[in-house]
Image (cartoon, helix red, strand yellow):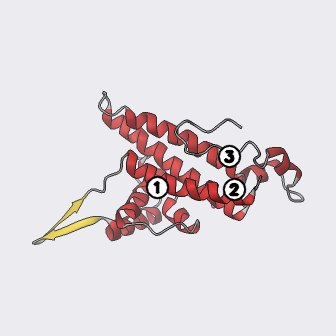
Amino acid sequence: MRGVSKLSTRPYSSKRYSWATQVKERKENETIWDLRRRAPAHFWARAENAYTCAKVLFDQKGETHNSALYEGFMRESSIALELILNALIAEQSNAAPPNSHDVFDLWNKANLPKLSSDDLMRLTEVTEVLYWSGRYAASTSDANLKKGEERSKKYQSSKPIGSTVIISPTPYGWDEFEKLFRIVLNQYFELHAENRPD
């Protein structure tokens, strides 16, 4: 496995639970594909790659094509959050994480700390990017669209002024993304160290 990116805070121990050990200890009738579906380090490594891409795209702000670069940052940061949540859930359960792009639900499934309304709104927006807005012109599922709308109404910052309601956008940039990513990453590394002591 490749080393951790320079953007990461902690590298894996050289004495980590190796892939060869995992293959030897796989369950009866479990294929190599089943093992890969529940491999936390796979999700972690892909999360680190998406994290690095998000950083590169975000740092290009101020150059030309700001809108395209920000869309790329949104997609990569969203994928990074989904993947690091999958790594944590796989580490917690020693099973494949749910086949879902709903980072809002994944956050709750991972039993992570409660978040502010602004951060819950960010998870709502990230989920929307993963499900459809990062790829399609419209949601491919009315149920997912309705769920996102309900969450947005609940967590968005709004203020009534007479008969008009002013909705304030929730900022989402590098600092907001990294804060969420680090919460999950730190939990992942702590649990990984407990599960695989030296």
Q: In this figure, which residue is indicated by the disc labeled 3?
A: 42
Q: Are marks 3 and 2 in contact (CB under 8 Å)?
A: no
Q: In this figure, which residue is indicated by the disc labeled 2?
A: 193
Image coordinates for residue 30, horizontal then vertical, percent: 84, 56
Image coordinates for residue 63, horizontal then vertical, percent: 31, 28
Q: Count residues near mark 2 (Cα–Cα under 10 Å), then give few for <14, some for 14-19, many for 20+.
A: some
Residue furthest left in the image: 162
| 136 versus 156 height, above or below | above
**Can residue 27 be seen from the camera position used here?**
yes
Q: In this figure, which residue is indicated by the disc labeled 1?
A: 180
Q: Are marks 1 and 2 in contact (CB under 8 Å)?
A: no
Image coordinates for residue 181, horizontal then vertical, percent: 50, 52
Badge 1 marks a residue whose secondary structure is: helix
* Amino acid identity at mark 3: His
Residue at (82%, 51%) from the top-left corner? 22
Residue at (63%, 54%) from the top-left corner? 189
Q: Count residues near mark 3 (Cα–Cα under 10 Å), then give few for <14, some for 14-19, many for 20+.
A: some
* Amino acid identity at mark 1: Leu
Q: Which quarter shows the N terminus? A: top right
Disc with the residue nearer the chain's start (1 vs 3): 3
**Mark 1 or mark 3, which is nearer to you?**
1
Q: Are marks 1 and 3 in contact (CB under 8 Å)?
A: no
Distance between the Cα atoms at labels 1 and 3? 20 Å
Q: Count residues near mark 1 (Cα–Cα under 10 Å), then give few for <14, some for 14-19, many for 20+.
A: some
Distance between the Cα atoms at labels 3 and 2? 16 Å
**Mark 1 or mark 2, which is nearer to you?**
2
Distance between the Cα atoms at labels 1 and 2? 21 Å
Disc with the residue nearer the chain's start (1 vs 2): 1
Image coordinates for residue 31, horizontal then vertical, percent: 83, 51
**Nearest the eye: 136 or 38:** 38
